[in-house]
Amino acid sequence: MKYKRTISMLLIGMSLYAMSPSMLIAESLGQHECQSLAIAAASFMSSRTRGESKDSLLDRLPSLEQPPYKKHSAKYLLLIEMHQMVEEVFAHDELDATTYMVFKSESCLKKVQGQEVVSYEVAYPQLKACSKLEFNDELTECSIKAAGTN
């Protein structure tokens, strides 16, 4: 079941993003949705820090196999992003919640503006370095730069 969900998520995500990702996301998501994703990102990272499992977090999200939203709607795209964030949160060693939140917020805003976004996988080493900075403007600026173009 776990693998089926992951495969299903990947297929849905691939088919969605194969259709001109920047245009689709820019038309559907806005600043409000990016703020919602940033809050969810911090929450997911904090949940991991508290010892919550990946499956526990995924179980709290609506299924991608039978989504409760129309495909390509803002809520559907948010759901895909949230599933992706849970996968990201557990893909590597833990980052602090602020670093991940700033990265996801900036990535979302770049998508909305039709700009190229660095994947979490590529940005992770830089984000790991960012998370070692004290919580201040340097950490925020570092996380924003990590979301920059490849």
Image (cartoon, rainbow, N blue to C red):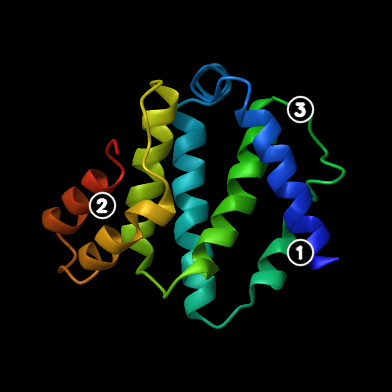
Tell me the kind of residue under disc 3: Lys
Tell me the kind of residue under disc 2: Ser
Look at the picture and state if 34 lies above or below 145: above
Counting every numbered tag in the picture gives 3
Relative depth, front residue between 28 and 4: 4
Tell me the kind of residue under disc 1: Asp
Q: Around disc 3, counting alpha carbons within 10 Å, would you say few (fewer than 14), some (14 to 19), or many (20 or more)?
A: few
SS class of the residue under badge 1?
helix
Residue for badge 3: 71
Picture coordinates of residue 35, whole percent (x, y)? 44, 40
Residue for badge 1: 59
**Distance CA(mark 1)–CA(mark 2):** 29 Å
Q: Around disc 2, counting alpha carbons within 10 Å, would you say few (fewer than 14), some (14 to 19), or many (20 or more)?
A: many
Identify the mark at residue 143; answer none if there is no mark.
Answer: 2
Relative depth, front residue between 69 and 93: 93
Which residue is rendered at x = 42% and y = 52% of the image?
A: 120
Dot 1 or dot 2: first in sequence order is 1
User: Is the C-beta separation of discs 3 and 1 under 8 Å?
Assistant: no
Which residue is rendered at x = 30% and y = 39% of the image?
A: 150
User: Is the C-beta separation of discs 2 and 3 under 8 Å?
Assistant: no
Residue 132 occupies quadrant: bottom left
SS class of the residue under badge 2?
helix
Picture coordinates of residue 82, whole percent (x, y)? 60, 49
Along the horizontal axis of the image, is 72 left or right of 29?
Answer: right
Which residue is rendered at x = 44% and y = 48% of the image?
A: 38
